[in-house]
């Protein structure tokens, strides 16, 4: 297996490179990225079977050479722009890139997208299904919806095995969650009066679980020419507080976040492996380290 990853210097792409670069079934990994943030370059993995190239996915000659020289069998497209000229990167450049890839006899072209394309119909309370209509509310979500349609059309028109994953927003809940967790750790340990929990419902998905889901889709033949939503666990602030009490030894009750039963679970029996409890334990460890420092 020889994999081309685009956008491998981004947060998600870089994490995916770290996830796959030690897998024995992979012979070669090539990352291409036009490097909008030079700080991310140092975070990418290095090794004998991984190569990095600074270029855009619309560079026809260079991409074509990479595909053939490295005998690429699989492509994972993380290349994405969330602001600025999103249409150029997410639609026009993607179309050029697909036109190059269709000439190569790929075993899979996998495209990374977002559940934001479903708009207000997709919430943690009423999750959109893969068959739900796209309701775009910004140029960004319009560009990602268009990118999904383009990838799907290339697959059908060129007999090209493609797959698409739409991920929940991995980072949207983090600032609120972090602030709530840190305050509650302190309040629980110091027996402070606990403030009322909000009625909000949140979603948790660790980046490592996103990597595992993408890898499962990429490497399973029955996932070709399909789209999958990658969902996280849902939880409330009260559930988080109960978990913190249990982890801090003030409760023996076991609390679990609500499970997932979506198309990805039904097809591959896949659910996130890294539960919210693991994140909370890391937060507690960080808290103790800061106290001891």
Image (cartoon, rainbow, N blue to C red):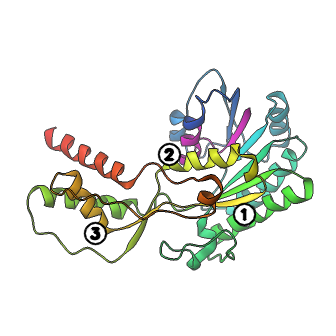
Q: Earlier in the sequence, mark 3 or mark 2?
A: 2
Q: Earlier in the sequence, mark 3 or mark 1?
A: 1
Q: Nearer the viewer, residue 293 or 248?
A: 248
- Residue found at the very far top of the displayed protein: 48
In this figure, which residue is indicated by the disc labeled 2?
Answer: 208
- In the drawing, does residue 29 fall left or right of residue 15? right
In magenta, the rendered stretch is 1-17
User: Could you tell me if the residues under marks 3 and 2 are in contact, i.e. CB atoms within 8 Å?
Assistant: no
SS category of the residue bearing label 3: helix
- In the drawing, does residue 74 fall left or right of residue 247? right
Q: Give above or below for 71 relative to 179.
A: above
**Horizontal and vertical percent position of residue 26:** 68, 29
**Horizontal and vertical percent position of residue 132:** 67, 75
Location of the C terminus by quadrant is: top left
Residue mark closest to the camera, 3 vs 2? 3
In this figure, which residue is indicated by the disc labeled 3?
Answer: 238
Q: Residue at x 67, y 43 (%)?
A: 34
Q: Residues within 10 Å of mark 1 (few under 14, many from 20)?
A: many
- In the drawing, does residue 153 fall left or right of residue 20? right
Q: Residue at x 20, y 58 (%)?
A: 245
Residue 52: quadrant of the picture: top right
């Amino acid at each position: 297996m020889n994999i081309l990853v685009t956008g491998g210097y981004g947060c998600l792409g870089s994490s995916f490179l770290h996830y796959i670069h030690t897998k024995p079934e992979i012979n070669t990994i090539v990352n291409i990225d036009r490097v909008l943030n030079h700080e991310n370059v140092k975070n990418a993995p290095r090794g004998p079977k991984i190569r990095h190239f600074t270029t855009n996915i619309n560079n026809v000659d260079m991409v074509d050479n990479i595909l053939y020289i490295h005998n690429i069998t699989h492509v994972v497209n993380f290349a994405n722009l969330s602001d600025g000229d999103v249409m150029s990167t997410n639609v026009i450049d993607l179309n050029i890139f697909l036109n190059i890839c269709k000439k190569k006899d790929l075993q899979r072209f996998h495209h990374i997208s977002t559940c934001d394309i479903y708009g207000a119909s997709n919430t943690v309370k009423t999750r959109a299904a893969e068959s739900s209509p796209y309701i775009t509310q910004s140029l960004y979500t319009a560009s990602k919806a268009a990118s999904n349609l383009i990838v799907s059309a290339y697959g059908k028109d060129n007999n090209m095995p493609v797959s698409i994953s739409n991920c929940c927003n991995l980072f949207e809940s983090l600032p609120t969650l972090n602030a709530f967790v840190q305050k509650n750790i302190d309040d629980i340990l110091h027996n402070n009066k606990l403030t009322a929990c909000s009625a909000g419902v949140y979603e948790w998905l660790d980046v490592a679980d996103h990597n595992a889901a993408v890898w499962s889709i990429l490497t399973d033949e029955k996932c070709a020419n399909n789209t999958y939503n990658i969902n996280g666990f849902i939880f409330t602030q009260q559930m988080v507080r109960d978990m913190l009490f249990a982890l801090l030894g003030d409760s023996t009750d076991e609390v679990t976040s609500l499970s997932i039963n979506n198309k990805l679970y039904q097809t591959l029996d896949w659910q996130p492996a890294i539960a919210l409890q693991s994140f909370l334990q890391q937060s507690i460890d960080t808290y103790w380290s800061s106290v001891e420092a």
